Image (cartoon, helix red, strand yellow):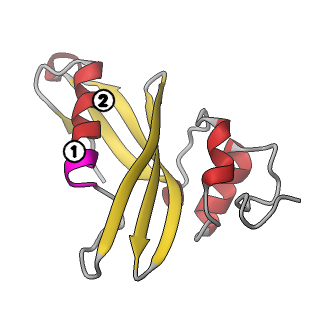
Amino acid sequence: MGTYFTDGATKQDAVDEILADLKAEPYHPHNDYKQERTFQRLDYKVTGNNLWILFAMTASGKRRVLVLLYLLVNGGKSGWGYKPMDEDMGPYEYNVPKSWFPKLTAPESEYSREWRRKAFPKFNDCRSAQEGHA
């Protein structure tokens, strides 16, 4: 997964581009287009050079709510860009809005579980509010 730049873009331009793309035709790193899926951006927040997105995906009747991270990168003369990833990729960034945790569905990978343990240390068992917290 690469880093994508837009010539002459400011940081805000990069954020606006990502949000517009997600609104028009949502991107998800695991989207293989082999099954029908629907996507919905539920919330977003820029913290430093991190654009966090609370994201819902429905496939085969199953709804999943997870966190996407777009690392915002200053490419100098190339302009600002971004590197997309989601919690299943185990990003090494943890300044995600803590208020999002109760909205998340159960993690589906060990990377996601481990990332949530670090990103949301108050919630040790990494389960969603719907399943109950320990």
Q: State whether residue 44 is above or below residue 24.
A: above
Q: Secondary structure at mark 2?
A: helix
Q: Quadrant of the C terminus?
A: bottom right
Q: Residues within 10 Å of mark 2 (few under 14, many from 20)?
A: many
Q: Which residue is mark 1?
A: 21
The residue under the point 61% across, 63% down is: 105
132 left or right, relative to 88: right
What main secondary structure does the magenta stretch of the protein show? helix
The residue under the point 44% across, 80% down is: 61
Q: Over which residues does the magenta segment extend?
A: 21-26
The quarter holding residue 35 reads: bottom left
Q: Which residue is mark 2?
A: 15
96 left or right, relative to 101: left
Q: Nearer the viewer, residue 102 or 73?
A: 102
Q: Quadrant of the N terminus?
A: bottom left
Of labels 2 and 1, earlier in sequence is 2
Q: State whether residue 7 is above or below residue 67.
A: above
Figure disc tally: 2
Question: Does the rendering let one see residue 29?
Answer: no
Q: Amino acid at mark 2?
A: Val
Q: Secondary structure at mark 1?
A: helix
C-alpha span from label 2 to label 1: 10 Å
Q: Amino acid at mark 1?
A: Asp
